């Protein structure tokens, strides 16, 4: 028993039973002489871990048994379902956004800076953006015909309706 007392004292479960020399003594005050049983707590913890691992191993075998049972009982999948694409539908997660952005910008640059046919039978072609801006600057934008049902309102002379009329000074002209 003395061996366990030394171990419990070393683990900190019990205090040394040496009274301090300068401690006041009061006859009505007493302290607990015994604490928890250290080896019992350690043994309970080890037992709990062993039981948990046994349960985990048993559950692994139970799940394997249930998976094989389900495979044997369930109906086989349809041939059409086996041929379908197994990838999830778009949009998918972006795994590398920097490369995706680089590819997008390269595609957009190829669209902006290359020649290609839009409709060869009608003679419509796409030209580089720089050349298109130079042509617009040289020729100007052709006037557009107004739609037949366009109705314009008559502007009020000299004022804008802002809600601050009479509350703020007029804008300088």
Image (spheres, helix red, strand yellow):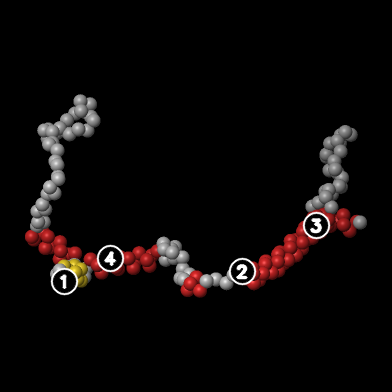
* Frontmost residue, 168 versus 110: 110
Q: Name which quarter of the figure residue 167 lies in.
A: top left
Please say if 149 is above or below 71.
Answer: above
Please name the residue that numbered disc 4 is placed on. 108
Please name the residue that numbered disc 2 is placed on. 74
Q: Earlier in the sequence, mark 4 or mark 1?
A: 4
The mark lying in front, picked from 4 and 1, is: 1
CB of mark 2 within 8 Å of CB of mark 4?
no
The answer, for residue 10, to whether it is visible in the render is: no
* Frontmost residue, 8 versus 120: 120
Question: What residue lies at 83% left-to-right and 56% top-to-bottom?
Answer: 40
Question: What residue lies at 15% left-to-right and 64% top-to-bottom?
Answer: 132
Q: Which mark is residue 44?
A: 3
Which SS class for mark 4?
Answer: helix
Q: Position of residue 70 (x, y in %)?
A: 64, 68
CB of mark 1 within 8 Å of CB of mark 3?
no
Q: Position of residue 150 (x, y in %)?
A: 14, 45
Q: Is residue 25 left or right of residue 96?
A: right
The mark lying in front, picked from 4 and 3, is: 4
């Amino acid at each position: 028993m003395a061996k366990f007392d030394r171990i419990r004292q070393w683990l900190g479960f019990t205090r040394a039973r040496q009274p301090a020399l300068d401690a006041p003594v009061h006859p009505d005050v007493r302290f607990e002489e015994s604490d928890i049983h250290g080896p019992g707590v350690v043994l309970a913890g080890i037992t709990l871990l062993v039981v948990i691992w046994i349960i985990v191993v048993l559950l692994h075998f139970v799940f394997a048994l249930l998976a094989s049972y389900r495979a044997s009982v369930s109906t086989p999948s349809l041939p059409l379902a086996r041929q379908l694409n197994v990838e999830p539908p778009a949009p998918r997660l972006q795994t590398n956004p920097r490369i995706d952005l680089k590819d997008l910008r390269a595609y957009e640059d190829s669209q902006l800076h290359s020649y290609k046919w839009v409709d060869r039978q009608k003679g419509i072609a796409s030209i580089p953006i720089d050349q298109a801006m130079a042509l617009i600057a040289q020729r100007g934008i052709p006037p557009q015909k107004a739609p037949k049902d366009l109705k314009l309102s008559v502007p009020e002379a000299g004022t804008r309706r802002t809600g601050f009329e009479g509350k703020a000074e007029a804008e300088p002209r």
